[in-house]
Image: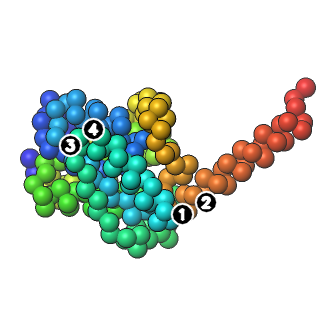
Amino acid sequence: MTGEILRSSSARDTVALHACCGPCLIEPLDALRSEGHEVIVVFANPNIQPLEEYVLRRDTLESYARTHGIRTVEIDVGPETWRDAAGDASRPERCRACYRVRLGLVAQWAARNGVDAVATTLSVSPYQDAEAIAEEGRAVAQEAGIGFIERDYRERYPVATRRSRAEGMYRQNYCGCLPSRAEAEAEREARRRTKEAQRRCPEG
């Protein structure tokens, strides 16, 4: 199926599912398994910093996958791989480059190991650019000579949130890279200041 973009749920393939964290894994994993795919979860996220955060997300994901009988693979290439590709860019170019790096690592691993197709959990988050994810996924899969399973899981996000909380999973409050952490902190501070101003000067 070289270069084929898989869209039909009737397809039955071995899938390398790129996963960014445990909470985002839950719903895409269930969806792909319900379609009959054999899933291998691949943790390939050189964007995640600092190291303590990387380990916490990886271990949370691996624990969930292990309890559900899913094989996991870690591709640990170090943060310099991400910095070389995306570190100097600003959003949205930085995010697109980040998708390309991570999905490219998984696609190349899948091609080397006889896996039919690649997919990703990234599109479960409403904070990600689903169109850019799909475009980069198609491109890296075609380059690797394998299929890409294109799915938009955003409608499953509320369920994924409830389930991950019920599981007691660690839930991060920024995307992964250090620039995204700084941006998230700035946004939270702006919201805090807005709420504080509204308390001091209520309408009416």
Disc 3/disc 1 C-alpha distance (Å): 30 Å
Q: Earlier in the sequence, mark 4 or mark 1?
A: 4
Residue displayed at 46% across by 46% down? 128
* Amino acid type, callout 2: Ala
* Amino acid type, callout 4: His
Taking depth in this image into account, of 168 and 113 the one nearest to the observer is 168
Taking depth in this image into account, of 46 and 129 the one nearest to the observer is 46
Q: Nearer the viewer, mark 4 or mark 1?
A: 4
Disc 4/disc 3 C-alpha distance (Å): 11 Å
Q: Earlier in the sequence, mark 4 or mark 3?
A: 3
* Amino acid type, callout 1: Leu
**Quadrant into which the C terminus falls:** top right
For the residue labelled by badge 1, is the local secondary structure a helix, a strand or a loop? helix
Label 4: which residue? 68
Disc 4/disc 2 C-alpha distance (Å): 34 Å
Residue displayed at 49% across by 35% down? 165
Q: Earlier in the sequence, mark 2 or mark 3?
A: 3
Q: Which mark is residue 182?
A: 2
Residue 100, how many percent across, how many down?
34, 59
Q: Is residue 7 visible?
A: yes
Q: Are marks 4 and 1 in contact (CB under 8 Å)?
A: no
Disc 4/disc 1 C-alpha distance (Å): 31 Å
Task: Tell me if 142 is positioned left or right of 96 in this view.
Answer: left
Residue 98's place in the image compared with 121, above or below, is below
Residue displayed at 50% across by 71% down? 88
Q: Earlier in the sequence, mark 4 or mark 2?
A: 4
Q: Nearer the viewer, mark 4 or mark 3?
A: 4
* Amino acid type, callout 3: Val
Label 1: which residue? 178
Residue, far top: 204
Residue 138, how many percent across, how many down?
25, 50
Residue 58, how many percent across, how many down?
38, 55
